[in-house]
Image (cartoon, rainbow, N blue to C red):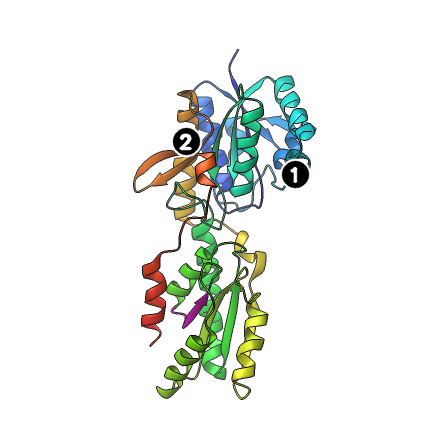
């Protein structure tokens, strides 16, 4: 009898999850496993919502956003009773290994589950647009989210220039400013507001005033939703107090950043990590996230991957300030 491996997507969806699923399923079959898809993340695991997957089950999905298995969060999996039910479903289905695709919360759940049921083998893939996990240069979905935000800002800049306005654009990032920072650099924004650094409105005012002295009539500021100010709307209100004569607009991109077809970068990353996860699983690895550092596949224990957020690139932060002159 072939060993069975369960696959689930947990937390928020991220572009590239389907590409990862495709790689996992086909590599699993190549290595002699029977892949089983688990719907709706840990909640679906508790409910026993599963389906056997074949090579054809993942045809034509590499370019699709979202995840054909569905994703989501499970309050019940946070309880010992919920995890016991999940373990029972795995035993009932004859599944002794899992690959979970998600972010911080997904890996915390997997870590706790393993402590209680060490006979289950679990590996994780970093599927989150936030790029806030240690042990990988990029998370699946991050590149797509940044490209979507940059495209939106490119369009807004046309209007900002035509109308002589200041636009504050809010991007996702409740606890981390990676999307905001990379979006700001790629779109040539005048400033960026992120959770990791205190917001200095005086410095922003000085930047804007320097631009006006050069007859610059428009500007773009990128705001992470988790910034201490409270987002783009609140930041716009604060700046409007200082510049009552200047037209200021706030735009919230929201969940649009999580949808759509994944970029080539995300598809390739997801494919590499999905295939590597199955190979490492066959070798006996467990309790770790599969990531890519440089050109090397690395395993980072769940506890280390989620212990603290990876730091922002200080050079990029400095370049925002220098290049806005």
Q: Position of residue 234 (x, y in %)?
A: 58, 71
* Residue for point 42% across, 70% down: 191
Q: Which mark is residue 275?
A: 2
> At 45% across and 33% down in the image, what residue appears?
23
Q: Tags 2 and 1 in contact by the CB under 8 Å rule?
A: no
Residue 53 seen in the current view = no
Badge 2: few (under 14), some or many (20 or more) residues near its Cα, within 10 Å?
some
In depth, the one of 175 and 284 nearer the eye is 175
Image quadrant of residue 40? top right
Pointer 2 or 1: first along the chain: 1
Which residue occupies the extreme left position in the image? 295
Local SS, label 1: loop
Nearest to the observer: residue 260 or residue 204: 204
Toward which corner of the image does residue 185 lie, by quadrant? bottom left
Residue at mark 1: 74
How far apart marks 2 and 1 lie (CA) works out to: 27 Å
Q: Position of residue 68 (x, y in %)?
A: 58, 39
- Residue 87, compared with residue 323, is above or below; it is above
Q: What segment is highlighted magenta in the picture?
A: 188-193
Residue 43: x %, y % from top left = 66, 35
Asked if residue 105 is among those painted magenta in the image, a careful observer would answer no
Which residue is at a point 41% across and 70% down the rendered structure image? 189
**Hey, which quadrant is residue 294 in on the image?**
top left
Q: Secondary structure at mark 2?
A: helix
Is residue 101 left or right of 294 when viewed as pictured? Answer: right
């Amino acid at each position: 009898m072939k060993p069975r491996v369960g696959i689930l997507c947990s937390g928020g969806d991220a572009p590239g999850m389907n590409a990862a699923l495709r790689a996992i399923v086909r590599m699993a079959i190549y290595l002699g496993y029977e892949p089983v898809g688990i719907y709706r993340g840990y909640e679906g695991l508790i409910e026993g919502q599963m389906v056997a997957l074949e090579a054809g089950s993942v045809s034509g999905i590499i370019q699709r956003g979202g995840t054909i298995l569905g994703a989501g969060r499970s309050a019940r999996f946070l309880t010992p009773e919920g995890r016991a039910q999940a373990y029972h479903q795995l035993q009932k289905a004859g599944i002794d290994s899992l690959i979970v695709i998600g972010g911080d919360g997904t890996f915390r759940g997997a870590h706790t589950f393993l402590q209680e049921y060490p006979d289950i083998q679990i590996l994780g893939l970093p599927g989150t647009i936030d790029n806030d996990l240690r042990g990988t240069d990029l998370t699946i979905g991050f590149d797509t989210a940044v490209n979507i935000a940059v495209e939106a800002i490119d369009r807004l800049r046309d209007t900002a220039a035509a109308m002589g306005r200041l636009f504050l654009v809010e991007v996702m990032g409740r606890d981390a400013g990676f999307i905001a920072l990379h979006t700001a650099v790629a779109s040539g924004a005048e400033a960026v507001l992120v959770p990791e650094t205190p917001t200095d409105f005086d410095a922003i005012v000085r930047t804007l005033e320097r631009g006006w002295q050069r007859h610059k009539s428009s500007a773009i500021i990128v705001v992470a939703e988790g910034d201490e100010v409270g987002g783009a709307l609140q930041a716009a209100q604060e700046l409007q107090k200082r510049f009552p004569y200047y037209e200021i607009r706030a735009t919230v991109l929201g969940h649009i950043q999580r949808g759509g077809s994944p970029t080539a970068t995300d598809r390739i990353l997801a494919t590499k990590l999905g295939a590597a996860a199955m190979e490492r699983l066959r070798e006996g690895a467990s309790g770790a996230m599969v990531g890519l550092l440089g050109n090397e596949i690395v395993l980072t224990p769940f506890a280390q991957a989620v212990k603290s957020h990876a730091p922002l690139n200080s050079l990029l932060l400095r370049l925002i300030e220098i290049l806005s002159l």
